């Protein structure tokens, strides 16, 4: 950080601290990942200096000969990856992509059917604290059986028939199983709803050919973040099966909702889409799931209780109260002390509060990017179990050393510790 260190040593030092934390720690936050140095370069570039309101060929500012091409390439690559007719790559993040989609497809006051937060849904799917919950009438579906992870599709159909939603929303941030898009498409068709999937968490697993693509079941819109398993820059995008739906989405994103696109992120999205189209990305996606299955199985061997008893994707939800008699908040803090990062999370029918719930969520996209495989996942599970079952805090420094040793064997793409640093 030559320029930054000279101009603002305080921020430079904190950023160095974060680099050190990433290199010497084990990242299990299910929504995080490490981008390639190429994506990093696109993000920190002269494209930041541009205003490009509008879409390629239809801008409100001059000088767009390069930005137009960059955005068009991002769009074309996104469409090819997800096999659909239209892509809008401008949403600044996942939440704006959700809101722009709702506003494109449903009049304020209409009903949207989404997944209950404590059963794995996301805040943006209509939790009462959100602004969108004041604009729309959200109703929710749930898991009928937290052991098997089965969503009750019969109940979903019944609720849809009764409530007549304008949008049927598939997608989650803490559900470890595959969704039945075919049944959801059928329900949406029966009640005249748009079928929309928010695949923020699993986009990388879909384009990496490990999980189903909702478009194959006839979904109308698929929206996603680009920074989770897809391993791109922070941002969002909205894909439409048909170009006519895409027109509604484009208008909703700009001018109705956002201003100018963040062009360096659009360029970085294009680079990420190219990376995700390579054959190696299929291997990466398969390894994410293999790693998650090993992590889950080893934790269960040690006596941990996992919601749905395992995982089919990149994440798992562990009931930390039943497993180690620790709330999610306490477990998260304790693991922070040894350099293992994850997040506290509500479990289905949560008996405690959202601020200190009964579970923790963990996922494998980031560690898989560092090159870890099944053997390391078994080791990580063991480190977690030992940290959370320790009766005496004196063992934590020893575990921290083991974490550093393991982490350092698997470099973070594009960053390394200065010589002599440990
Ligand atoms: N949708 C889902 C399913 C998510 O998991 C998330 C983020 O965790 C979002 C939307 C929101 O994305 P962002 O944090 O980029 O606004």
Image (cartoon, grey):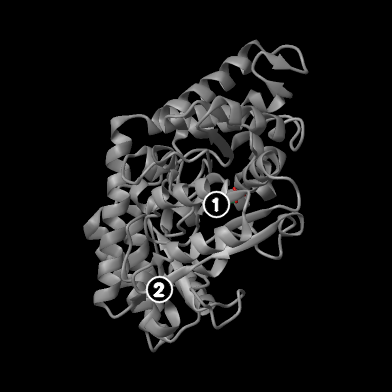
The residue under the point 70% across, 16% down is: 58
Residue identifier under label 2: 146
38, above or below 174, in the image: above
Q: Residues within 10 Å of mark 1 (few under 14, many from 20)?
A: many
The residue under the point 37% across, 29% down is: 277
Q: Where is residue 279 drawn, in percent x and y?
A: 29, 31
Q: Where is residue 43 drawn, in percent x and y?
A: 58, 32
**Residue furthest to the left:** 375
Of residues 171 and 341, which is closer to you in this image?
Answer: 171
Q: Where is residue 300 drawn, in percent x and y?
A: 28, 74
Q: Which mark is residue 169?
A: 1
Task: Specify the quadrant of the image occupied by residue 45.
Answer: top right
- Disc 1 under 8 Å from ligand 1? The reply is no
User: Is residue 211 in sight in this rendering?
Assistant: yes
422, above or below 72, in the image: below
User: Is residue 410 in sight in this rendering?
Assistant: no
Question: For numbered disc 1, what is the local secondary structure?
Answer: strand
Position of the C terminus, as image quadrant, is bottom left
The residue under the point 58% across, 22% down is: 71
- Mark 1 or mark 2, earlier in chain: 2
State left or right for residue 203 relative to residue 59. left
Of residues 175 and 221, which is closer to you in this image?
Answer: 221
């Amino acid at each position: 950080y030559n320029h930054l260190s000279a101009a603002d040593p305080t921020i430079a030092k904190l950023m160095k601290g974060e680099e050190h934390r990433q290199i010497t720690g084990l990242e299990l936050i299910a929504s995080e990942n490490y981008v390639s140095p190429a994506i990093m370069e696109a993000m920190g570039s002269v494209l930041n200096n541009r205003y490009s309101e509008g879409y390629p060929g239809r801008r409100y500012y001059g000088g767009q000969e390069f930005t137009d091409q960059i955005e068009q390439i991002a769009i074309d690559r996104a469409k090819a990856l997800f096999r659909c007719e239209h892509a809008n790559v401008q949403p600044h993040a996942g939440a704006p992509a959700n809101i722009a989609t709702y506003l494109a497809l449903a009049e304020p006051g209409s009903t949207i059917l989404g997944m209950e937060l404590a059963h794995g849904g996301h805040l943006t799917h209509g939790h009462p604290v959100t602004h969108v919950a004041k604009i729309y009438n959200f109703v929710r579906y749930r898991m009928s059986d937290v052991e098997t992870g089965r969503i009750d599709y019969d109940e979903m159909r019944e609720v849809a028939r009764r409530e007549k939603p304008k949008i049927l929303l598939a997608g989650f941030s803490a559900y470890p199983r595959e969704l039945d898009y075919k049944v959801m498409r059928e329900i949406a068709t029966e009640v005249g709803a748009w079928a929309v999937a928010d695949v923020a968490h699993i986009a990388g697993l879909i384009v990496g050919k490990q999980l189903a693509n909702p478009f194959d079941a006839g979904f109308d819109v698929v929206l996603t973040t680009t920074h989770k398993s897809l391993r791109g820059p922070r941002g969002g995008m909205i894909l439409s099966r048909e170009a006519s739906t895409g027109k509604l989405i484009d208008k909703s994103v700009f001018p109705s909702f956002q201003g100018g696109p963040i062009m360096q992120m659009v360029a970085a999205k294009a680079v990420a889409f190219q990376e995700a189209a390579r054959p190696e990305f299929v291997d990466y996606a398969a390894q994410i799931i293999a790693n998650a299955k090993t992590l889950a199985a080893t934790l269960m061997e040690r006596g941990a209780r996992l919601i749905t008893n395992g995982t089919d994707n990149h994440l798992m939800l562990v009931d930390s109260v039943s497993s180690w008699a620790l709330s999610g908040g306490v477990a998260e803090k304790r693991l922070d002390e040894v350099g293992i990062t994850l997040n506290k999370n509500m479990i289905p029918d949560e008996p405690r509060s959202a601020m200190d719930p009964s579970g923790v969520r963990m996922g494998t996209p980031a560690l898989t990017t560092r090159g870890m495989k099944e053997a390391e996942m078994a080791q990580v599970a063991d480190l977690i179990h030992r940290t959370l079952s320790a009766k005496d805090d004196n063992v934590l420094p020893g575990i921290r050393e083991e974490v550093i040793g393991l982490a350092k064997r698997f470099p973070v793409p594009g960053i390394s510790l200065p010589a002599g640093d440990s």
